[in-house]
Amino acid sequence: MNRKTQTRDPELTRARILDAAEELFVEQGFSAVKLSELARAAEVTKSLIHHHFGSKEQLWEAVKNRAFERYFQAQMAMFEEAGEPDALLLRRSVEAYFHFLRDNPGVVRLFAWTHLEGDNHCSDLDNQLVGAGAEWIRQTQRRGLLRSDVNPTHVIAVFVMTCTQWFEAKCHHQHWPDMGSDEAFLEDFMKIFMEGVTPRK
């Protein structure tokens, strides 16, 4: 299939641009990637990138959203399928996020570049998920199944930041004495975390 044929299929062209952009952004970060380099990698013109995404910044947001979408959809489905609010869903959510990051190292690198470059844009997906998660925790607190003296959004922040940092900094801490495997860390973290959010007797 030649480039001329590819550009006649808008969805294929958009996907090719996203694929090339994700690969380059994961490798170099947002700031270092030039639009001309991206166009060469995707085998399209710069004007076609502008046509589909408007700007490099908007393409960056589209790449991040697409990378996060799989976890977003799975987590939102967990909320919809769950019954009464309880602590079990919180445990399952932590484990799902941890395993998502473990299985998607490219996403971990995208997050790392986002943090390094001071990108303060919070996507709609992020806001929706945190909002839904915080509301679930709040309802579980009202039922007396999670301690009520902590901010629900802080509960989410604790596990998100811990899981993200575990994978972002793994090249460093994996050499610490007796650090062990991903699953060993997750098991111990869950003991500490769930004990911390359990109501005081």
Image (cartoon, helix red, strand yellow):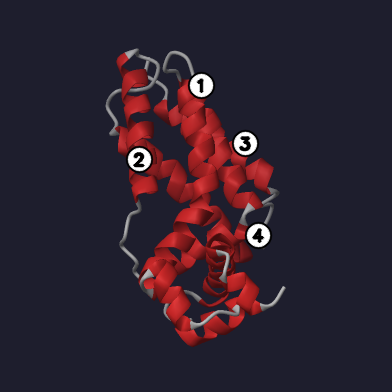
What residue is pinned by disc 2?
128
Quarter of the image with the C terminus is top left
Q: Residue at x 56, y 75 (%)?
A: 24
Closer to us: mark 3 or mark 1? 1
Give the tally of numbered discs. Answer: 4
Query: Dots 2 and 1: beta carbons under 8 Å?
Result: no
Considering the numbered disc 4 on the image, is that residue within a helix, a strand or a loop?
loop
What residue is pinned by disc 1?
81
Q: Amino acid at mark 3?
A: Glu
- Distance Cα–Cα, label 2 vs label 1: 17 Å
Label 4 vs 2, first from the N-terminus: 2
Query: Dots 4 and 1: beta carbons under 8 Å?
Result: no
- Distance Cα–Cα, label 4 vs label 2: 33 Å
Residue 120 placed where, x, y %? 31, 62
Considering the numbered disc 3 on the image, is that residue within a helix, a strand or a loop?
helix
Residue 174's label in the rendered image is: 4
What residue is pinned by disc 3?
187
- Distance Cα–Cα, label 4 vs label 1: 36 Å
Considering the numbered disc 2 on the image, is that residue within a helix, a strand or a loop?
helix
Q: Residue at x 38, y 33 (%)?
A: 133
Closer to us: mark 4 or mark 1? 1
Q: Nearer the viewer, residue 173 or 39?
A: 39
Residue 7 placed where, x, y %? 57, 72
Closer to us: mark 4 or mark 2? 2
- Distance Cα–Cα, label 4 vs label 3: 16 Å
Q: How many residues crowd mark 3 within 10 Å: few (<14), some (14–19), many (20+)?
A: few
Label 3 vs 2, first from the N-terminus: 2
